[in-house]
Amino acid sequence: MILYSMPSSGNSYKVRLLLALLGRTVETVDVEYDTRALSDAKSRLPFGKAPMLVLDDGTALPESNAILCHLGEGTRFIPADPTLRAQMLAWMFWEQNQHEGVIAVRASLRTYPHRAAEATPERLADLLTRGHAVLQVMEDHLAARDWLVGDSPTLADICLYAYTHSAGEKGGFEMDRFPAIRRWLDRMAALPGYAAL
């Protein structure tokens, strides 16, 4: 398999993290912003962005959470119970619909030079307020449990870890406000096979 991966991207990191936790290796093609590698690969990326996993038979799988579902099939990271599996998917949908568009976007505006013009004080302030509200949803949920779904880590935890673990450093979010999230981040980082961004 070949993974087209943007090294700085949380979405690409999700896939690399799952592969590491599973002890699997793939050929990786780094396609960072503003690099020739990304320009050269654009025509091969179905949606024009990374990550994309190319299977051994040549099938291209775009979208990080779809790739997670494919790689996670038959592993401990997808619950066998249909209700738990649906709850896992709900968190993964929520991550793309609510979390990423705030947490990742604020980090992106603060990190990537090509997005600096979009980082107006008003926009950053709005994203900070909305991001704290999104993180509070996770905080409330994790206050009485170790994992997002069930009693062990699932794809939902991997999915939401990717941008949450760097929300303070990259996004400027006040992570001291979220002790349950911080404990969960520590549990994730302690998993056997863990690989950092």
Image (cartoon, grey):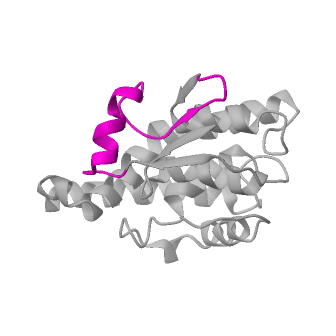
Res. 186 image quadrant: bottom right
Tell how many labels.
Answer: 0
Tell me the residue at 64%/46% (across/down). 26
* Above or below: residue 77 compared with residue 132: above
Res. 2 image quadrant: top right
Q: Position of residue 3 (x, y in %)?
A: 55, 42
Tell me the residue at 70%/56% (across/down). 20
Left or right of 12 in this view: 196: right
Quarter of the image for the N terminus: give it. top right
Tell me the residue at 33%/43% (across/down). 38
Which residue is at the front of the view, 130 or 75?
A: 75
Q: Which residues are magenta?
A: 32-58
Left or right of 67 in this view: 136: left
Instruction: Please check the rendered image and state whether residue 54 is part of the magenta-colored stretch, yes or no.
Output: yes
Which residue is at the front of the view, 99 or 142?
A: 99
Q: Position of residue 100 (x, y in %)?
A: 44, 46
* Above or below: residue 47 compared with residue 169: above
Q: Position of residue 64 (x, y in %)?
A: 54, 39
